[in-house]
Image (cartoon, helix red, strand yellow):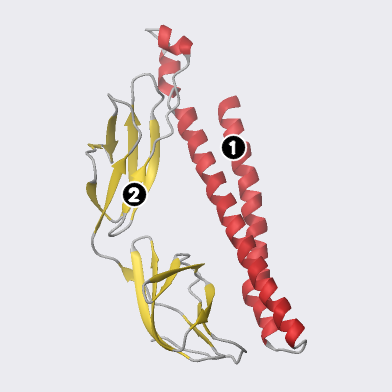
Amino acid sequence: MIALWSIALAGTGALEITNGDAPGEILVDGIPTGVTAPGRVRGVGEGLRHVTLTYGCHTGSARVDVLAGQVARFEIPLQEAAGNGWIELADVPRGTRATLDGEPLTQQTALPCGAHWLTVETPGYDRFEQLVLIEPGQLAVIRPSLVRVRLSAELDDTPPPETASVSWQRPAIAGGFAALAIGSASAALSWRAHATRAEASAALLIDDDPWDPAVPLIYAVDVDPYRARAAAGWVVTGLAAAGVAASFVF
């Protein structure tokens, strides 16, 4: 059951989705809003709206009556989504062999929703490995970042056993740290942008009415938590960058 709370605000109606454990994009009437949960979608026209939230292999929807000058705040219950997604490799040289979860991969292979382990092997390049998240009805196009094998390794036909055993580990570990750094940096930028937009909205409300009760709410919901998340994201980014460097040094 979805509970609704309305808070009087000037201007058009708004939707606020409070799901804290499913940071997927919010869609209103099937149109992407660019806002992820938990978050507030502003400028929504009056009337009955169909709101959808999808995160990984889970999805949920709700029909909400939007009123002008009010914020409809609610949580969308999520259920496991049915159906398959697809994966496709792009920009790979001839002779490339790819496996997914240990099985040979063909072009645009249909897969059940969830995480799958991709391995790409190309002569003259280090092995590429990546965890791929498949979503229902979505095509995941993967462009492997192939790194050429060092010349000394190419000329040595009989590498020592210890070298052969770790040739793929350092790139794999560095790739994991790099993915973490990119992901946390992207999240930090998104959270900071969200907080900046919310702060600008609060500033406009203050200019119109310094005593508007919505201002503290905007800071409590949209500004302060996202500032803290952005700071944490940059800390994780720094640690992951250090991990990339350490994986090649040690």
Q: Is residue 84 above or below residue 129?
A: below
**Residue 201 placement: quadrant:** bottom right
Question: Which SS class for mark 1?
Answer: helix
Indicate left or right for 149 with 87 as reference.
right
Dot 2 alpha-carbon crowd within 10 angstroms: few under 14, some 14 to 19, many 20 or more: some
Q: Position of residue 246 (x, y in %)?
A: 60, 31
Quarter occupied by residue 250: top right
The numbered mark at residue 140 is: 2
Q: Nearer the viewer, residue 166 or 63?
A: 63
Q: Quadrant of residue 243?
A: top right
Q: Position of residue 29 (x, y in %)?
A: 37, 77
| Residue 250 visible, this orientation | no
Q: Quadrant of the N terminus?
A: bottom left
Q: At 24% across and 38% down in the image, what residue appears? A: 105
Q: Amino acid at mark 2?
A: Ala
- Mark positioned earlier in the residue sequence (2 or 1): 2
Please give the label number shown on residue 157.
none
Circle number at residue 243: 1
Disc 1 marks a residue whose amino acid type is Gly
Which residue sits at x=51%, y=76%? 18
